[in-house]
Image: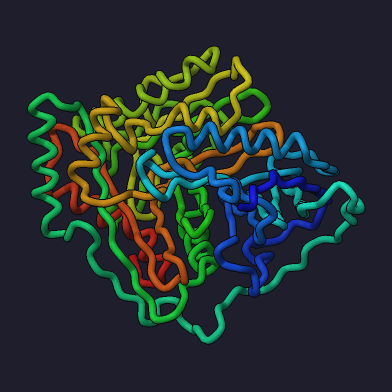
Amino acid sequence: MTVPVLPRLRARTLEAPPVPDLFDLLPPDADPTTVVSWVREGDGLVGWGRAASSGDLGMTGGPDRFDAAVRWWEDVVAGAEVLDEVDLPGTGLVAFGSFAFSPASPDGGGLVVPRVIAGQRDGRAWVTSIEPVDPSSTPIAATGPVSPAGPHLPDGTADPADGIRLRPGAVAPEDWPALIASAISRIEGGEVSKVVLARDVVASSPTPIDPVLLLRRLAQRYAATWTFAVDGLIGATPEMLVRLQHGRVRSRVLAGTVRRDRTPAPSVTEAHPELEEPHSSDPRLHLVSDAKELEEHAYAVHSVADALAPHCASLEVPEKPFVLELPDVYHLATDLSGEATDDATSLDLAAALHPSAAVCGTPSEDAARLIAELEGMDRGRYAGPVGWLDASGDGDWGIALRCGQLAPGGRSMRLFAGGGIVAASDPQAELAETEVKLAAMRHALGLGS
């Protein structure tokens, strides 16, 4: 029996010219299973190839999946050679990761290190080359800028929606209201205060679904979200679970959703801030302000604040949310921030926050049991942490929402959507909310919204 050996890596980051679209840098012949992404409003990271993976050592599922991944990453960083000539968040040695919602899921997730990462931020751009080496090999050679590969089109496919069909997943749409009614009854019985329930839809295609086309479509329509890809999990999340940069901790909580109508959007008093400043009073709160939505949001904010408190000083929790506008919906949103007081990595903080009330419920253990009983499916990595971290432990971790999971071979994809259920919920309205949330991935697949 061969015992896996911890990889030794060399990474070098060089300055590169900015590009209009990071996705242009992804080579058409890149293995689609290795494509990674974390992009928002043109800035972020994309990558391809595979230099190392925590899964190679069998570190995947179970309740210690986060701790095992953090230990693996610390060991990889300790043995790596890094030359970083740019020194910005996302440069040097970087790993991308995604993790299952439930510790019982066989799709446990983990960390992956691409062979090439291209990034840009605030007008500066870079390329990082990463390769596994042995102690006797020569230092990594300098590499020039990555040239744009041009529009990425899969061979023989003119229309990404050609032949794609949707079918019900574990629970058919017509059965969803009855499931929600059952959850409301359990809430009224005192089992939980809130539970978040999700459903899936399966997209089938006669040809492999191209992840880069999905990412392009998501980034173009949902630019204010974080467009992500890791191990075939692809989506555009509006929810930042946690960001750690230079000792500053930030988190964006979303809970409470209202579908946008077709009338012109109201004046935007606060655009889509990237967690940089405390938000002020928002006059648009009347759009998403009924008792059910405010109650759902309050549960989510409190769960995140309670989880961050042991790791942060001067934790700022705004009294009122603001309204985050996306093309299909309005969300109630709250940005929390504080100063880190321990040596927890961004992945440690993501693990401490998972699962928040925004994707599980309150109390979390009781809500998780109710989810396992009622949903009738394995969420896989839907609603789990997804993002990246660097050699210092800094990084971004979102919640895997508005997403789908490609099956092996790429000819089918599970799409997911859910909503928070409280005593005041209406079953038909909750079904409608999931349909609105599925619009992002339907759009990505070229099926309209």
Q: Residue 337: percent from the left, percent from the top?
A: 52, 23
Residue 253 drawn above or below residue 449: above
Q: Nearer the viewer, residue 266 or 442?
A: 442
Q: Nearer the viewer, residue 386 or 5?
A: 5
Farthest residue, direction bottom: 156
Farthest residue, direction top: 314
Q: Residue 168: percent from the left, percent from the top?
A: 22, 64
Q: Residue at x 11, y 33 (%)?
A: 186
Q: Nearer the viewer, residue 124 or 59?
A: 59
Q: Residue 396: percent from the left, percent from the top?
A: 57, 38
Which quadrant: the C terminus?
bottom left
* Colouring mode (rainbow / by chain / secondary structure / one colour): rainbow
Confirm whether residue 124 shows in the render.
yes
Q: Residue at x 19, y 47 (%)?
A: 430
* Quadrant of residue 425 within the rendered picture: top left
Is residue 423 rendered to the left or right of residue 229?
Answer: left
Residue 210 drawn above or below residue 249: below
Number of numbered markers: 0
Residue 270 drawn above or below residue 249: below
Is residue 431 rendered to the left or right of residue 107?
Answer: left
Confirm whether residue 284 shows in the render.
no
Q: Residue 360: percent from the left, percent from the top?
A: 30, 35
Is residue 383 rendered to the left or right of residue 18?
Answer: left
Q: Residue at x 28, y 57 (%)?
A: 200
